[in-house]
Amino acid sequence: MQKKYFLILGGFLSLGLLQGCNDSNDQEQTSTIVDTNPNSCNQLTSDGSTVVVGSGQVGDPSAPEPASAYRLGLKAKTSNQYMVVANTPLATKAGCDILKAGGSAVDAAIAVQAVLGLVEPQSSTIAGSAFMMYYDAQTQKVTAYDGRETAPAAANEYYLVRQNLEDPNSLAPVPSARRSGRSIGVPGVMRMLEMAHNEHGKLRWNQLFDNSVQLAEGGFKVPGRLAAAIQSNAASLALDANAVKTYFHADGSPYQVGETMTNQDYARTIRTIAANGAQAMYSGTIAQAIIAKAQQDKGDDAANTPITPSLMTLNDLANYQAKKRDAICFTYRSQYHVCTMPPPSSGGIAVAQTLGILENFDLASYGPTQPETEGGVPTVMGVHLVSEAERLAYADRDKYVADTDFVPLPAQGVSSMLNKNYLKQRAGLINPDQSMKVATAGDFSVNAGIDNTVEHGTTQFTIADAYGNVVSMTSTVESSMGSFHMVDGFLLTNQLTDFSAQPVDSTGNLVANRVQANKRPRSTMAPTLVFKGTAPGDFYMATGSPGGGTIIQYVVKTLVGALDWNLDAQQATSLVNFGATNSANTNVDSSNTSLDLTALIDGLKAKGHGINSSAQSSGVATIMRIAIQNQQIKYVGGVDPRREGIVLGNGAL
């Protein structure tokens, strides 16, 4: 049994940990498990020494370098008590520092999110959206937290295609639906995190933001992915004076990799949120600034480019509610209990359906070759079966799944879509020798439209704390750099473009994912937890990924890699991404150029698969809990080599 200590305050900044509390979680705090090892939350170097993340020392993993397609040679990391895996080193360090100080997984998630909004704004923002799967070790209960944005109360089904909602001849929003105010949703992530913190926090709210304030005020080295995002989005960012001030030098040149960037506006915003809770974003000066920015009708450029404003109001912010939802949980091969995100995410149902279909095949016989090398090369039959199962799942997802507060699922809902007999019947449609190319949705005698949405500005982090609690959270700004509207140091998202722009399909049927007032756009985010046995209790694995519509494929690949092919956390995460939406093409990720995928691609073509072999930018973050070597139970982490993240914790990292 782990020894318990009371909170030790040394080594942290004065903002939260050395001040009194003025926050929404002001109850008496319980005793905390504190780690006094000075090397915890540091990175182990090749010579066996440790280096502080963000220190600038030799070997510092946060030292930026030009973004590479794939980092070779990553190995699984182990930790005795707690672990954080995130897609940027500075955010990983922030979460780990909180766990070291006795914080819970939710506490750490808040610290991670605050840093991500600063150093990874192309993927995440404090004014964004997120889904969190949380496991409470004491109660052995899984909870799904929904912090998805909503459409404004004034929106209707033509919100993304008409400037004047009531005029069928109205012009479309300008300069585009995304760059206009119409793409900006009512933010949800901080409300969601505050809800989770009120229920599961160990440290006080204002103790969780020191890292983000320090980095915003003192500066951080610009990572490669952020520099690339600034460069590629320069024209759209140029319409916003706040973005120009933040991401460009006085001469108009964008910040480059390795240059030091500060964001004093962000520091002031975070200090306000730390002192006053999430409510600071939903009323008062920050809320007023958000509405003023969203309603901006011309650009800050010399040409005063027209911008169609949002119809979001202060009432929309004041009325936003994060939600707790029933997790989607199911058994896999009678060995595992899997829990994932329900609607308005479509990702959880699709992951569950894919695995339910795959249960009907001996997938273990088709594992990758040479798995010790970056997860190995997948086999033709392994990729074929997974891809065909995904085609069937995507067909149902595209037709039936949206925000179930507005559009119910067919038949008896989740239970019908995950019915074992139904999924066995769907599995019977798979020909082992020939791809179906495009699948037909299952017949639930329901008419609904089809919509395919793409998101590119998303991130994932996974956390296990010293108390046995686990968080898997996917956070998003939607597309890279969101809507390009910036206020008080943070970006506003273009999340509403996840709705179907047109309310009816080509046959005249209403699209399930059409815009409606106060509705949440469909997502594909699928943070997932796995337990041994047939109920929560024996935690085994947590994972998730960014990647828009391909999130389902990344999560399924990682789960199958670990559960069917016995890959470790890093191997399953590093494994070649593969899979298919409901289209003729199958994705085979080419980001790892050290692997020869020729035979795999040729074998899939022989089965009728079209091939998309472009590199894929997943961001899988995986933690497993397993017995290693001397049978000691440890956390084992894997981080996606296609992004910049690291694994941190205590013990042999």
Image (spheres, rainbow, N blue to C red):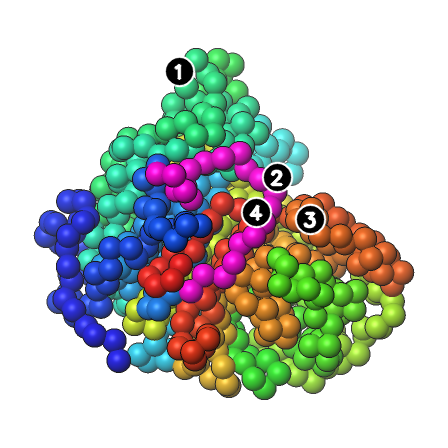
- Which residue does the numbered mark 4 point to in the structure image? 71
Q: Residue at x 42, y 78 (%)?
A: 630
Residue 250 numbered mark, or none: 1
Residue contact between numbered discs 4 and 1, judged by CB atoms under 8 Å: no
The magenta stretch spans which residues? 57-78
From the top left corner, tell me how far across and down residue 585 is, in percent: 79, 54
Residue 644 is inside the magenta segment: no
Q: Quadrant of residue 214?
A: top left
Q: Quadrant of residue 466?
A: bottom left
Horizontal arrangement in the rendering, residue 293 relative to residue 1 (left or right): right
- Which residue does the numbered mark 3 point to in the structure image? 594
640 lies above or below 235: below
* Mark-to-mark CA distance, 4 and 2: 41 Å
Give the dominant element type of the magenta stretch: helix, strand or loop. loop
Label 4: which secondary element:
loop
* Mark-to-mark CA distance, 1 and 3: 42 Å
- Which residue does the numbered mark 2 point to in the structure image? 161
Q: Is residue 288 visible?
A: no
At label 3, which amino acid type do we have? Answer: Ser
> Which one is earlier in the sequence, the residue at label 2 or at label 1?
2
Numbered disc in front, either 1 or 3:
3
Q: Residue at x 56, y 84 (%)?
A: 335
* Mark-to-mark CA distance, 3 and 4: 11 Å
From the top left corner, tell me how far across and down residue 492 is, in percent: 43, 39
99 lies above or below 286: below
